[in-house]
Amino acid sequence: MGDNKKIGELYLINGPVVKVRKATGFMMHEVVKVGDSKLTGEVIGLEGDNATIQVYEETSGLKPGEPVEGTDRLLSVTLGPGLIGKVFDGIQRPLDALRVKSGDFLQRGIVAPPLDLDKKWDVEVEIKEGEEVKEGQVIATVKETPLVEHRIMVPPGISGRAERVKASGKYTIDTTLMYVANEDRKHKIRLYQTWPVRVPRPYKEHLMPDEPLITGQRVIDTFFPISKGGTAGIPGGFGTGKTITQHQLAKWADAHIIVYIGCGERGNEMTEVLEEFPELVDPRSGRPLMERTILIANTSNMPVSAREASIYTGITIAEYFRDMGYNVALMADSTSRWAEALREISGRLEEMPAEEGFPPYLSSRIAEFYERAGKVKCLGPEDKIGSISVIGAVSPPGGDFSEPVTTHTKRFVRCFWALDKSLANARHYPSISWLDSYSEYNTELEGWYAENVNAEFSKLRARAMSLLSEDDNLQQIIKLVGEDVLPDDQKLIVRVAGIIKIGYLQQSAFSDVDSFCEVKKQFEMLRLILMFYNRSSALISKGVAISELLNGDILNTLMRMKENIPNDRLEQFKEIEKELKNFFDSLDKKYENIKEAS
């Protein structure tokens, strides 16, 4: 910035939105320091010499006439070693460092570097002096945590010859590892890089979503799978289990890195996350889950404009780890609160409102966010493939899925996990409705399931879904006239659908055995349930009474498979299959003998 400071003058304060005159030289989305307290703000509108600024901190006490200083930089995040395990606010200020400076209650105008500038990291340099390097190339590695190797990359847009390369050793993130010289100039390459949050990071090529993000939750993996690089929305009213579902996904999804954005949720709910996540153990490694997790906390009582920025902060950090070749899962809880922040700021700007007071550009902002997901071929000469899977919770008022945020989210996600209040009230978790949910990834993932699980997987899924659909129709009849009037074949559908709902789709997050279910176990469970249906259906068509088929021991075995057979004891399914065959063969033989005798 030099000596040419850009100083404007405050003349209007309207909550988080302020207006500045004499704002010559300010640029759109520039970060500015507002007032004598030097509050952080961002330019969101320019008209002549006047600028409109949204302030990321509480604006009470500001007065007209106070100075506003430009910084010549866009709202950006710092990307480098030290991100993992940290808790940031919506504009990447580390909450632990802010607490040291201001105590339990955050004061205004407090700043702290996002990453620790004094900590020394063990850096393994992989580039030699004079070597040609390209944008996105890995030039060094840092063992950031026991679970994550942090790959230092050449920033996008920089390629050339490596000069003055440091040897491997212990360095702070501010150390210049090398210079990259090209025709324009020499670029300093440090352990960190900065990136503007509203600009998507570049990549080589967008790839097809042909591999599922395995979550270990049967209702998701079997019926409504999401791919690595996919997008999903979880809409649900208060108390339907959005947060616990996202906790389960964060814990069990086979992603290398988890980015969790608590965007505008209640303070006590975010406190639970901050207390529980450090206690969670990564089931695959036995290490603390925080060793591969980044939390962004922006609760409902924090400044509303920082809530709007938190989504972009999170997705930019996720893109950075994607560029290293990692699979990243991003959880946003909840995008409805983010949309409410947009609505409030839009109202302060006196913009023309659209449906339910939301700004007209709500749909395009939601689209911009979800479009940054995907599985890509990353920049660099290496063959790096990374992905970001975005899972956004939606909190429709009163559980009304026709409200704007849910409607627009549905347009831009390809996986829709609708949470059902009646299921939650019945303590059926995850309370994902099998009738209202859908996944558009089923067709693209068929090949993966056929190759890695079983060629019959997709057929079994389709048959189970059709039974659940038939059961829903039959339940309407049962409500009117009772189950006794149904013929035996329809009674069988109701009973088998009950086994699928309770014995398969219901899953306890607190069970040591059933909290996570391997996909091969899911297949075996579904195969045996449908085997029971097919054999029973064949016997009913021969005249066997349904009462003889509903053997208590057999039904109990099918209902308890999820708890009785661990993921590493799948051979036990053969014993259940043998038991089923013996039961049906004996019934078959019995009725053949009766037939012959008559």
Image: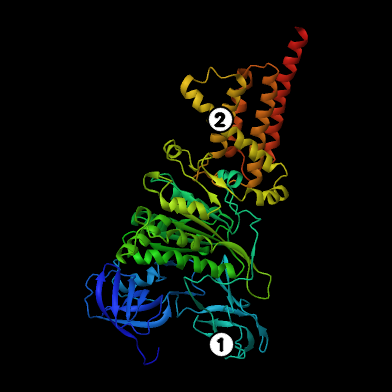
Q: Residue at x 54, y 35 (%)?
A: 501
- Give percent across and percent down for residue 417: 51, 47
Q: Residue furthest bottom?
A: 3
Give how far apart the Cα atoms at labels 2 and 1 are: 66 Å
Q: Is residue 367 visible?
A: yes
What is the three-letter code of the residue carrying label 1?
A: His
Q: Residue at x 44, y 35 (%)?
A: 426
Q: Label 2, on which residue? A: 471
Near-viewer residue (590 or 412): 412
Which of the numbered marks, if any, corresponds to residue 187?
1
Badge 2 vs badge 1, beta-carbon distance below 8 Å: no
- Give percent across and percent down for residue 570: 67, 42
Residue 589 lies in quadrant: top right
What is the three-letter code of the residue carrying label 2?
A: Asp
Q: Is residue 559 visible?
A: no
- Give percent across and percent down for residue 114: 43, 74
Q: Which residue is drawn at 72% across and 31% down?
A: 578
Residue 273 lies in quadrant: bottom left
Q: How did the renderer colour the structure? A: rainbow
Near-viewer residue (559 or 512): 559
Q: Which residue is drawn at 70% across and 40% down?
A: 571
Badge 2 crowding class, 10 Å Cα cut-off, few under 14, some 14 to 19, many 20 or more, is many
